[in-house]
Image: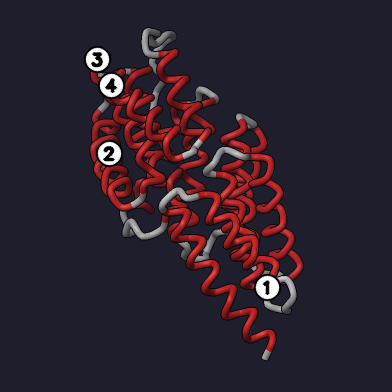
Amino acid sequence: HAQGEYRSQTLLGCAAGTLHMTRCDWQKADAVLSSCYAAIAQTDDRQMLGVAQCLLGLCHLFQGDTSQAHEWFDRVSDTGKDQNHHVFKVWGAYAKAEAHLYAGKLDDAKQLALKARALSKGLGDHQSACIIEGVLAQVYLANGDARNAYKHARNAARFAAKLPPTNFSTLEGIAAPAQVGAELLRRNGADPGLDTLIKSGRKALKSYANVFKIAQPRHHYVEALYAQARGDLNSATRQIQKARSASIELGMRYEQKLAVSALNAIQEKPDGAPAELH
């Protein structure tokens, strides 16, 4: 009877915590999810324990608290190992990759994303695949590997096309096609494949941001990148300022970091020879 009550409390708590996160109400989300986690920890329900751990990690991740996020995602991985729960192993690996990406630890992000990619083979989990490919696209972009950035951004777009905008945590997968595409356009100039990637990616990200406030700063950031790539610095500046304002309002420190970096870089010109994408 007691375990049944704990499970009911956890299910309701996870749903409520997720709702608070979609509204970027981080304090309420953390309070509800922490209570939820404490309740389920008293039962033998390892599946709901893993879900609660993952949600608490996301609550910290989207606030830009990468250290705490990584700790929670490590627990998700441990739960997956302890229970031989394949999905938790995948979630833990790619979520830790996201935390490393946000912290600028690109080698660690790449290693964990590739691990998650290998673990996810055959699961048919399009959402996880979308996020994994998005993280890889951004890691390769940051490392200056245009070919692989483009390849994984296209993969992310392929999986994103199969997903309705119903899960707030898919941000990196949904954002990557337009984000990576716009940055490659800025660096390397026009390319027919990029045009297609950017067009579909911008549309998907806009739809996603219309549903989830969590994606609004990134939407403005990507629009800024695209405007900058076209040479429209006035529009780029306006969009970056919108991204920065939205990220401050929503308490999303990583998104603030992206906006500030973009503001600092807006006057810079692409350097080096264009990279081959195909």
- Identify the residue under disc 3: 234
- Identify the residue under disc 4: 238
The tag earlier along the polypeptide, 1 or 4, is 1
Disc 2 and disc 3: Cα gap in Å? 19 Å
Crowd class of label 2 (few under 14; some 14 to 19; many from 20; radius 10 Å): many
Q: Give residue 12's position: percent from left, percent from top.
A: 52, 73
**Amino acid on which the number 2 mark rests in the picture:** Arg
Residue 156 visible: no
**Amino acid on which the number 3 mark rests in the picture:** Asn
| Dot 1: element | helix
Q: How many marks?
A: 4
What residue sits 49% from the left and 37% below the top?
A: 252
Quadrant of the snapshot with the C terminus:
top left
| Vertical arrangement, residue 77 with respect to residue 101, above or below | below
Q: Nearer the viewer, residue 133 or 240?
A: 240
Disc 3 and disc 4: Cα gap in Å? 6 Å
What residue sits 71% from the left and 52% below the top?
A: 74
Residue 107 visible: yes
Disc 1 and disc 4: Cα gap in Å? 46 Å
Q: Give residue 239's position: percent from left, percent from top.
A: 30, 25
